Amino acid sequence: MNAIPTSRTGQAIPAAKLLIDGEFVESGTTEWRDIVNPATQEVLARVPFATKEEVDAAIRCAHVAFATWKRTPVSVRVRIMLKYQALIREHLPRIAKTLSAEQGKTLPDAEGDIFRGLEVVEHACSIGTLQQGEFAENVAGSVDTYTLRQPIGVCAGITPFNFPAMIPLWMFPMAIVCGNTFVLKPSEQDPLSTMQLVELALEAGVPKGVLNVVHGGKDVVDALCTHDLVKAISFVGSTAVGTHVYRLGSEHGKRVQSMMGAKNHAVVLPDANREQTLNALAGAGFGAAGQRCMATSVVVLVGASKDWLPELVEKAKTLKVNAGHEPKTDIGPVVSRAAKARVLGLIDAGVKEGATLVLDGRDVTVPGYEDGNFVGPTIFSDVTTEMDIYSTEIFGPVLCVMTAPTLDDAIALVNSNPFGNGVGLFTQSGAAARKFQSEIDIGQVGINIPIPVPVPFFSFTGSRGSKLGDLGPYGKQVVQFYTQTKTITARWFEDGTATGPVNTTIRLG
Ligand code: NAD
């Protein structure tokens, strides 16, 4: 047997557990990865890459549990969600600390991450009306037609590192409350806060086998995408992996939704409120170290607003880079050394390509956290559409600033970018806003709102290169995603028989 790994201080390093059939179990795998605090490089825990047999066991027990769970009354499912939302609320500060330590984001951001997920759980409590079918009486003589929205079976969720609370909570509560069972594959970079939320789900009463967790990377994801018993897959992550998951899952007959990468523009008209707009741009560009799929990564200054650039730079300089748990931190570290190297490589490429580096965050040092993966706020101007810094999702605190002579030019620029996750317009003109919302080809539009993520009674509606599959996560769309509509056409005669004795075909014509 392998010796138990220890930290620099000699403490045993805990191992993240798998959840299979209601039991938290240690994986028998030989492949492990460290979960590292990005501000300190301290190893917080180890995460196993589950074996093929473990993934198969998780899916099979979810399949067995489905037989009972799908018949569990909706009121019982709702009561579990009601208890779950109360437990998340109670444990939010504790989970936020774990999340900040493993992911790097500031404590207020970590609390926001959990809170946005909690709102989905609250919405799941409305499933009684959300999952209702339709009924049409007397569509032909003694014939009624109605629909049932039935759960589909074992669903799987694959989540990214940047929202380890919100995104798992986009997925399993809605899937489960619809009557499905679930296998979750959290990000291998920061699964500890996700696991705390999973523990609370069991405490709330989610029965054994209804929610399962397997950890790992490509092999585990591919096993979920190809297993016969998995009926639907929700993916959130990068475009490359999301496209792979969408293709592989679809080829194997699964319903798949992939929410993917982004390049979100903020278009600024000269009539916008200057102070509010610049604050919004700094928050949306650099908050969470730019590691949000809805982060603003390109600012388009229209007409005379091009003169606002120096002020934007000054705002960015005031942001405090520090470890996420330190008070008053604005920008925490990026998630890993590899992520930092990638961001710095893209900044170097921007300089080589001829963009003007008006604020350089490459050499930031944070006293007390010299080993942290910090990148300071960085701003490029004179960016063109051919540059890598424009075409690639940087996923770091880097803003590309461009100019456009008119609103029409700005709209054309945004619409020719392949991504379609989010866009913002800053203006005081209702007419400009109305034109923009109508002509812009982006799934989520903010008017004087920099990060327009919809609340959970709407759905997340990224589009074009940022999404594959028709239906988005949470809201009404995800109820469609996690259910199969069955349409019943029924005839009942007054003597109680269901059909006539001879001709059993119902003629509607
Ligand atoms: P990622 O694609 O690297 O990882 C996502 C998941 O896929 C993880 O669980 C990971 O283990 C798994 N995975 C990684 N490589 C794989 C492979 N080769 N084959 C199969 N599975 C693999 O994404 P990330 O770096 O964790 O997250 C950041 C990305 O997620 C960004 O592109 C961001 O824009 C995107 N994102 C999108 C949304 C959205 O709603 N559109 C929300 C959050 C994050």
Image (cartoon, rainbow, N blue to C red):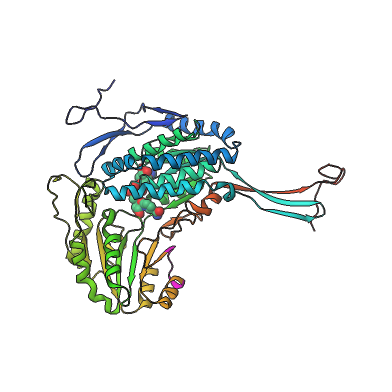
Q: Say which of 488 and 342 sits in front.
A: 488
Furthest-top residue in this view: 1
Residue 234, percent across and down? 46, 47
- Which residue is drawn at the image coordinates 53% and 39% (left, top)? 79
Question: Quick check: can you spot residue 366?
Answer: yes
Residue 261, percent across and down? 37, 55
Query: Which span of residues is magenta-colored?
Result: 438-444
Q: To which quarter of the image does residue 417 belong?
A: bottom left
**Residue 67 horizontal side relative to residue 287, left or right:** right
Question: Quick check: can you spot residue 236?
Answer: no
- The total number of labels drawn is 0
Image: 21 above or below 387 = above
- Which residue is drawn at the image coordinates 20% and 44% (left, top)? 39
**Residue 349 horizontal side relative to residue 443, left or right:** left
Residue 342, percent across and down? 24, 52
Q: Say which of 452 and 235 sits in front.
A: 452
Residue 443 highlighted magenta (yes or no): yes
Residue 144, percent across and down? 75, 51
**Residue 355 horizontal side relative to residue 242, left or right:** left
> From the image, which quarter does the N terminus lie in?
top left
- Which residue is drawn at the image coordinates 25% and 75% (left, top)? 306
- Which residue is drawn at the image coordinates 49% and 41% (left, top)? 81
> From the image, which quarter does the C terminus lie in?
bottom right
Residue 329 highlighted magenta (yes or no): no
